[in-house]
Amino acid sequence: MRISVVIPAHNEEAFLPKALQAVLTQTLPPFEVIVVDNASTDRTREVAEGLGVRVVYCPQKGVAYARQAGLLAARGEWVAMTDADSIPLPTWLQTLARHGEGAVALYGPLRFYGVSPWTALVSEWGYRAFLNLMALLGKPNLAGANMMFFREAALEVGGFPEVEAREDVLLGWKLKRMGRVRYVPEALVLTSPRRLKGGWGRFLAQQVKNLLGDPRGYFGEDGGRER
């Protein structure tokens, strides 16, 4: 299985090295690693090139545009995506690949890192409960920090929609019409807690709003997404 790993990045020089190190040391080595430089003004490109990965430039700011650019540039049969502020476990790709047969897309859970043990526990098991509920409802909830899909299937449905947020979830729903979208609980990815900047209340309220189809303001008033 040839897997292209795509990481969208807007001004991510601080977080990107850890993300790339985690991807480059997977127990199942990726076919290629692509960092999509989404109109960065810092050293994002230099950091990525310094670690020997492929860089694709996407001038139109917005994570949906960056993900689409990565999808179009990928040369692997499968495309896995994570975020520049996220750290996949060493067996991430191997675990997803093991469950790939008969599926068009796969996704797994997330856990905040760099927080108290209690916050990490709540973030992981709360999210796992949510993913299990959505799976039971037939609404797979792909997350850009932890997902993999068959490239040709994604291209056939048009790839990522041009929205401010929720592009990952919407792609998953489109792929579900093409075939099996499988939740893989063992495929854990750690992610930064910066989305908690406004506290748990604001974070959870925005998740509900996003789930209901209104992602406005998800990344602040300017719509910027620092990843």
Image (cartoon, rainbow, N blue to C red):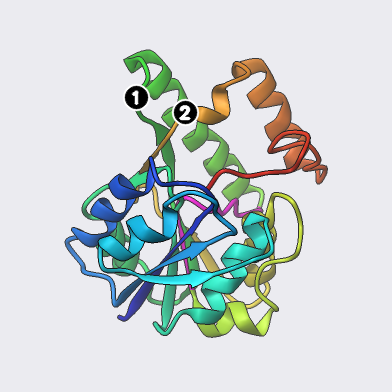
Sequence-first tag of 2 and 1: 1
Indicate left or right for 58 with 157 as reference.
left
Residue holding disc 1: 114
> Label 2 is placed on what type of residue?
Pro
Q: Residue at coordinates 60% horizontally, 51% vertically from top-left?
A: 141
Residue 218 percent coordinates (x, y): 72, 37
- Mark 2 vs 1: CB contact within 8 A: yes
Image-quadrant location for residue 140:
bottom right
Say what secondary structure mark 1 lies in. loop
Indicate left or right for 19 with 43 as reference.
left
Q: In the image, is residue 118 part of the stretch drawn in magenta? A: no
* Structural distance between the alpha carbons of marks 2 and 1: 7 Å
Q: Which residues are magenta?
A: 138-149
Residue 183 or residue 75, whichever sits in front: 75
- Crowd class of label 2 (few under 14; some 14 to 19; many from 20; radius 10 Å): some
Say what secondary structure mark 2 lies in. loop
Residue 169 percent coordinates (x, y): 65, 55
Labelled disc at residue 201: none
Q: Residue at coordinates 28% horizontally, 58% vertically from top-left?
A: 23
Indicate left or right for 42 with 174 as reference.
left
Residue holding disc 2: 193
Q: Is residue 175 above or below residue 23?
A: below
Indicate left or right for 48 with 215 as reference.
left
Q: Residue at coordinates 40% horizontally, 54% vertically from top-left?
A: 184
> Label 1 is placed on what type of residue?
Gly
Q: Residue at coordinates 23% horizontally, 61% vertically from top-left?
A: 24
